Image (tube, rainbow, N blue to C red):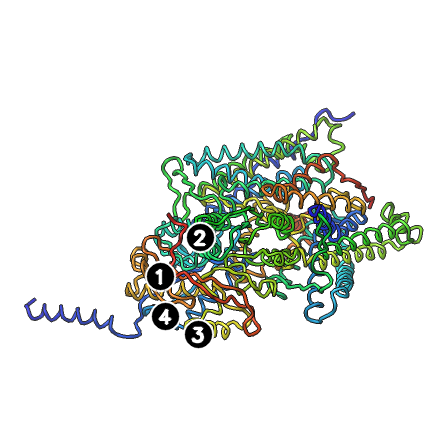
Amino acid sequence: MLPASFDLTRLRASERWRVSERLFWMLPLLAYVVFPDSLVLLTHLFITALFCLSLDLILGYAGIVSLGHAAFFGVGAYAAGLLASHGWGEPLSGLLVAGVCAAVLGFVTSLLVLRGTDLTRLMVTLGVAMMLYEVANKMTSITGGVDGLSGMVVDPLFGRFQFDLYGNTAFWYALAVLFALFWIARKLVHSPFGLSLQGIRLNAGRMPALGAPVNARLAAIYTVGAAYAGIAGALMAQTTQFVALDALTFNRSAELLLMLVLGGSGSLYGALLGTLVFMVAHHALADVTPEYWEFWLGALLLAIVLFARGGVMGGLRYLAQCVQRLSRVGGGAP
Amino acid sequence: MTVLFDGIASGMLLFLISVGLSVTLGLMNFVNLAHGAFAMAGGYVCVVLLNTLGLPFLACLPLAALATAAMGVLLERTLYRHLYGATHLDQVLFSISLVFMAMAATHYGFGSQQQPLELPEFLRGQFHLPGLDMGVYRLFLIMVGLLIALGLHLLVSRTRFGAQLRAAVDHPRMARGMGIHVDRLFTLTFALGSALAGLGGAMGVEMLGLDPGFPVKYVVYFLIVVAVGGSGSIGGSLLASLVLGVVDVAGKYYVPQIGAFLIYAVMVVMLVLRPQGLFGRHAAR
Amino acid sequence: MNLIKRVFLRYLALATMLGIYSVPGIAAEPLKIGLVLPLSGPFASYGKQIENGVRLYLAQSGGVFSGRKVILFVKDDTGVAPEISKRAAQELVVQDKVDILAGFGLTPSAMAAASVATQAQKPMIVMNAAASAITTKSEYIVRVSHTLPQITAPIATWAAKNKIRKVYTLVADFGPGQDAEAQFKKTFMAAGGEIVGEVRTPVKNPDFAPFLQKIKDAKPDAIFLFVPPGEQTIAFMKGFTERDMGKSGIRIIATGDLTEEDVIDGVGDNALGIVNALQYSEAHNSPENKAYVAAYYKAYPKSRPNYMSVSGYDGMQLIARTLEKTGGDASGDRFIAAAKGLAWTSPRGPVSIDPLTRDIVQTVYIRRVERVAGTLQNVEFEQTAALRDPGKP
């Protein structure tokens, strides 16, 4: 006789916030105190981390390989930028509108993304991003073209906190949005919906037999991922008060993929850690060897692919396993 | 009419550079985004031979191809073989890392400016027919492209090597059981793909320029050809390249406002209609 | 305290204060200058040229401006990400506490960083970004390079005066390209010329074949060309020569970016005969330039001095001379007030800063590409002196 109920305790346990997670979220607060002159860099870090998180949702959890994720970032950035330069400077509503625009684009393109092999998907996502780039480049009167969209006037947050030179307001704004969206994403991936996504990634053929509509789920997560990326783009536009075409380039999508791989996909924290490591390394190395930083980036990526495929998260998991094994050896029964 | 000719020439160049990728992707199921780096290497070898050693242009082309093939073999033996069974994502990441290193090394060795290339006299200028101006170099490109396409087709379908290759791709274990050296075959195929890339890159310097940023600038185009044409199909690559070349050139002539947009739109449409490409086949590795 | 003691103490205090300021060796505060330049990526050559010019001036002047030692901070903004330009500018101001911001190789970089200059009230010296609107984005911006309209109007005037009636314009589709096209059309048509066609090419497109064919079919007297310097110039000239368009009587007129010293050797003999307009040529015949060129080759034997390096050089010269006027005070408002109307002789010729717009006023030369002593040079044969930026209202 099979058991009437399935044991869900392991799943429920992973849903609770671990101590290490709570400690991790203390880090930004610490950074504010320890690096008061680098708030702009930290703000960019939070924004990029959010962007990377959006990619993790579709790549790490649903298995959709995308080389054109910058499309949604760009759409969000331009949406917020256009609102702010035409008189609607309220930041939070700007974020919302940007998220919705990106989500709509995501939903429409998800129909294209569901067909074909990995390579096809790669090319379609890339093609969509490149088309958007060309459109933005051409419509200079609206987007400012290559020169960029300037003249954005962003109102003080909540009517009180002006976006200042030191970046205080931007810092807390970006951090708050990142945390809120992370919290939602975390809830999402631990829900039945999120679990079905992992099932789809591992064996799409099997899932319909379990009652999970594969295409609908993939379209849904792609839309959510697009919305997150759009919000990240809007944050960038609002905190910089400037939007340029580089928000839509292939480079941006490719670098994002790198960051996610560096951190380890499929765990949400990998996205955050990968962004952290990449941006800190870039900032440090770029001042030392601006021309040849690319070489070391390539070498690092090569090393990861060959030897440390799980990225930083993989490395941490390995360490955790070692620690566990050691403690078992030390304190376990012979 | 000239527009059509220019489009075909443009498509031929695209074919020359991309066919190598179609070969490695289709026959070995390896997504090699570093293909552009091999093309770039071929270009630089050609430029160095031409400018520094003063060799005639027509001799530099096959030498560039050979040099790139040698590089391909070296990399295949040492690095690529570890990733044959890996996921496509891993292969993408791996090849991107090689691209970055190649670009930075080239920047270090040659500087970031454009490499000058002077064509020999007999390849310059134009032929004039009524209603049609044909660039000599473009004609040369078309002829070489057709020769290569024919040659590859014969190689794969008429020679023993081709038969062994097709067997190894369809069922490696069975092929090994028949005494075919699958590993060596793949090395040779990779060398062939790289040689084609090198040749394409060398021939493309005249029309596309050559600087360390070459791989990322054009990787999109190669991928488009392979995705639309279907990996592994030489005929598919040829057809896709020609269509894309003509659409691109004609689009820029008749509706320059849309410019490069058209090529991506066509690609997306074709992929949506036929996701496996025009003549796609799936390797069973 | 009695009177004598009080007076004595006062004199003592006064003497001490004067003494401190007159003793040599107790230096005034060092002058921190922050450079934001593209040093990596597709525009790395711009950053390199500008930095070369900057460092050359510092080496020649001993690195001390009005008694203040110059400390240079250089940050790479990759040229393609304006948010990095803004961040770099902000970090220079907040972390490194620079007194003056300078550099900015491209228009988006300058536009994004303008608000930093305003918020921090620091002078910002633009050394290459060429869109007219840049100086309007902040009261603290001074430009020492050029604007597109400034070098386009003279060539349009020259064309109209030299039997060129019909022109086809081809520009790259971005800010500076559109500025150039607009200015050329305005000046050329006002002088009685006819624009037989115009096309804007995508910024990322080295294959000009379809565009060239269209132009050939239209049979103009000349093509007015503006594309980003570098590979596009080479590609265009190759296509032009391949189609024998020169032989069918079509001339090329352009802004000097097409044939500047950094790229002209890559274009090769195909460039001979092109008439163009720019503010600086290596072949400019003046004692200042001869000295500059000699010093440049000595310091950087493997490159040729071009207009970007001169902008870097002149940017430093501007700072040095302004500080002489303010007595070493580099605070935003005083600096800008003193910089307005400043004039000096640059290696390119006489230059000054327009007090109304804070933009550069300079002589723009009409040049032809010729081989001089075996090297390709832009030989000047006409000029328009003291030209303000016509792109401003």
Determine the secondary structure under disc 3. helix
Q: Is residue C273 above or below residue A274?
A: below
Q: Are marks 3 and 2 in contact (CB under 8 Å)?
A: no
Residue A314 visible in the current orientation: yes
Going by the image, does B45 lie left or right of C390?
A: right
Q: Considering only order in the chain, which callout, 3 or 1, is on the residue closer to the N terminus?
A: 3
Classify 10 Å Cα crowding around label 1: few (below 14), some (14-19), many (20 and above): many
Residue C352 image label: 1
Q: Residue at x 59, y 36 (%)?
A: A225
- Residue situated furthest right in the rendering: B178
Q: Amino acid at mark 4?
A: Val
Say which residue label 3 marks.
C291
Going by the image, does C178 lie left or right of C60?
A: right
Quarter of the picture containing the N terminus of chain A is top right
Q: Residue at x 43, y 57 (%)?
A: C146
Residue C149 image label: 2
Q: Considering only order in the chain, which callout, 4 or 3, is on the residue closer to the N terminus?
A: 4
Q: Position of residue B183 (x, y in %)?
A: 84, 55
Q: Position of residue B179 (x, y in %)?
A: 93, 53
- Give the Cα distance between marks 3 and 2: 29 Å
Q: Considering only order in the chain, which callout, 2 or 4, is on the residue closer to the N terminus?
A: 4
